[in-house]
Image: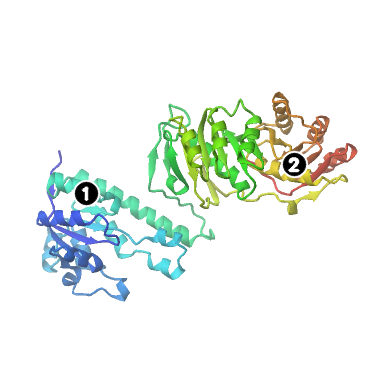
């Protein structure tokens, strides 16, 4: 075991006083001298505990509206001195600098202030200067100093005080230093990203403080961890822990259903990030029944999501199906009890929060960052390409199919009719293969494609797809357009009474 070092003094200067009282009392019990500033000093005094104001050491008051309190050689000298260095020890004595063995500091809540919608001036004032400097200094000098940089670490530090009576090992101090640099780097990243919202500086910085180790990754032999604030987006009401694959499917489900936010009752069933069933109806019960009819085989073990409250009747139907996750904005009391009937079924309440506007993924020895595809095709975007004009019902179905197509792996073709997903061809290397797959799948579940619509995530370089679609009764096509051979597909549609519209927007999803 490494040699233990006895702490004799501590500097405490924190924004939040939550959880601080037992630490202060323990330090006092251990006869550890406490130095403090401002509100923290007042808090300690009100506990009836002796505290030395930092300004008594520096001979300077808090100035510039509190912007400068601890930025002084007598404070940083007390933290940064090397206790085994004779020259440092002499300078501490010469300049009457107190030795500081423990530094307890947290930072102004910059991210919370940004999230609150505060003014720029209020946000700027929450950029901590003294706190971040104290943390860096104490963590740098972990050989002699213990740095406690977050309220989240108070209990661990208190346990250490109780266990070792104010003594720490080099291992203890280095562990707290590691935590401190995690805090400081995250803080600086948040500030940079606030200033760089327009991406004027070409630099990638992303930081998440909370990581949750998963049972495993995509497969059992792979390690997996989720970094993020899952609870900000969901309330988990029931079921087992979410897996790596669950999280990917939930992400796909939420992004897909976001296309139908505020619309008529819509239900989707997803498998491997793609919708295998989706329908929009007058009731959520009927929407679920018709979504399930899209592919009752793939629905086994799937992810279910609704854009409205799930009621008792719908829950009774869902309960007949083995599914991994159910997501909705709310559940009736009886519906929730029914769904809880399977102990492992994960039940999530989706909160009304904004999703990120950028996507990040690893690639080769770096990362790829892009804007999310936030463009949703609308009636206003459509340009009629054929002589044959689509009916209102066909236009409605084409927009419906386009939304699904946008969230389906490329190359993809989506077939829909009467606001119901009939089938899709997903992740194919050829658009013809995608269309053939979708037709075969639709037929296997007894869908009549006469009068259905077809959506494609990218243009048709040849007229083969519209010809195949026309032969099975599809009467309307929505696609981005943009091929140098667009006219070939347009000509075929004109000759065979098929309506075609172009959106001008490609929706590849790799």
Residue at (76, 29) in percent of width and height: 448
Query: Mark 1 Cα within 10 Å, few/some/many (few <14, many 20+)?
Result: some
When asked about the image quadrant of residue 293, the answer is top right
Residue 435 percent across, percent down from the top left: 73, 31
Q: Nearer the viewer, residue 164 or 454?
A: 454
Closer to viewer: mark 2 or mark 1: 1
Residue closer to the observer: 388 or 214: 388
Q: Is residue 56 left or right of residue 183?
A: left
Q: Residue at (66%, 38%) from the top-left corner?
A: 279
Circle 2 sits in a helix, a strand or a loop, which is it?
Answer: loop
The residue where tag 1 is placed is: 157
Q: How is the image coloured?
A: rainbow
> Residue visible at 72% across and 37% down?
416
Quarter-of-image position of residue 400: top right
Quick one: SS at disc 1? helix
Quarter of the picture containing the N terminus is: top left
- Quick one: which residue is furthest to the right in this view? 495
Q: Which mark is residue 459?
A: 2
Residue 17 point in image, percent of width and height? 26, 59
Going from N to C along the chain, the mark reached first, 2 or 1, is 1
Alpha-carbon distance for marks 2 and 1? Answer: 61 Å
Query: Does 123 appear above or below 32?
Result: below
Q: Is residue 9 above or below residue 314?
A: below
């Amino acid at each position: 075991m490494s040699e233990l070092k006895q702490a004799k003094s501590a500097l405490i200067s924190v924004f939040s006083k939550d959880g601080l009282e037992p630490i202060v009392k323990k330090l006092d019990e251990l006869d550890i001298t406490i130095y403090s500033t401002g509100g923290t000093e007042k808090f300690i005094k009100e506990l009836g505990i002796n505290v030395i104001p930092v300004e008594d050491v520096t001979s300077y008051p808090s100035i510039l509206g509190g912007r400068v309190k601890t930025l002084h050689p007598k404070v940083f000298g007390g933290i940064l001195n090397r206790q085994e260095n004779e020259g440092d020890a002499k300078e501490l004595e010469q300049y009457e600098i107190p030795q500081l063995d423990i530094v307890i500091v947290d930072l102004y809540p910059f991210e919370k202030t940004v999230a609150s919608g505060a003014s720029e001036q209020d946000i700027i004032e929450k950029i901590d200067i003294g706190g971040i400097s104290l943390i860096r200094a104490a963590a740098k000098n972990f050989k002699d100093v213990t740095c406690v940089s977050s309220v989240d670490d108070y209990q661990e530090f208190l346990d250490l005080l109780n266990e070792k009576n104010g003594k720490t090992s080099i291992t203890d101090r280095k562990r707290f230093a590691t935590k401190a640099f995690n805090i400081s780097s995250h803080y600086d990243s948040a500030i940079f990203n606030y200033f760089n919202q327009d991406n004027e500086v070409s630099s990638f910085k992303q930081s998440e403080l909370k990581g949750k180790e998963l049972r495993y990754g995509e497969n059992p032999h792979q390690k997996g961890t989720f970094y993020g604030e899952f609870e900000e987006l969901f309330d988990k009401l029931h079921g087992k822990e979410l897996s790596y694959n669950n999280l990917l499917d939930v992400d796909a489900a939420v992004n897909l259903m976001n296309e139908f936010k505020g619309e008529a009752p819509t239900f989707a069933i997803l498998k491997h990030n793609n919708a295998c069933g989706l329908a929009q109806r007058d009731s959520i019960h009927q929407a679920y029944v018709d979504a399930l009819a899209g592919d009752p085989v793939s629905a086994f073990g799937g992810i279910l999501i609704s854009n409205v409250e799930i009621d008792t009747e719908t829950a009774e139907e869902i309960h007949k199906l083995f599914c991994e996750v159910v997501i909705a904005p709310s559940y009736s009391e009886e519906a929730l009890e029914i769904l809880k009937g399977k102990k492992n079924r994960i039940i999530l309440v989706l909160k009304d929060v904004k999703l990120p506007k950028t996507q990040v993924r690893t690639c080769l020895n770096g990362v790829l960052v892009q804007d999310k595809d936030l463009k949703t095709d609308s009636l206003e975007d459509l340009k009629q390409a054929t002589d044959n004009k689509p009916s209102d019902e066909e236009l409605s179905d084409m927009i419906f199919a386009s939304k699904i197509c946008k969230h389906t792996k490329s190359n993809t073709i989506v077939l829909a009719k009467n606001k119901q997903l009939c089938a899709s061809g997903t992740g194919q290397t050829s658009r013809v293969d995608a269309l053939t797959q979708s037709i075969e799948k639709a037929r296997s579940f007894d869908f009549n494609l006469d009068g259905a619509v077809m959506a494609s995530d990218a243009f048709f370089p040849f007229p083969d797809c519209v010809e195949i679609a026309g032969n099975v009764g599809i009467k309307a096509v929505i696609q981005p357009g943009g091929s140098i051979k667009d006219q070939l597909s347009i000509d075929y549609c004109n000759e065979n009474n098929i309506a075609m519209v172009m959106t001008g927007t490609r929706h590849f999803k790799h």
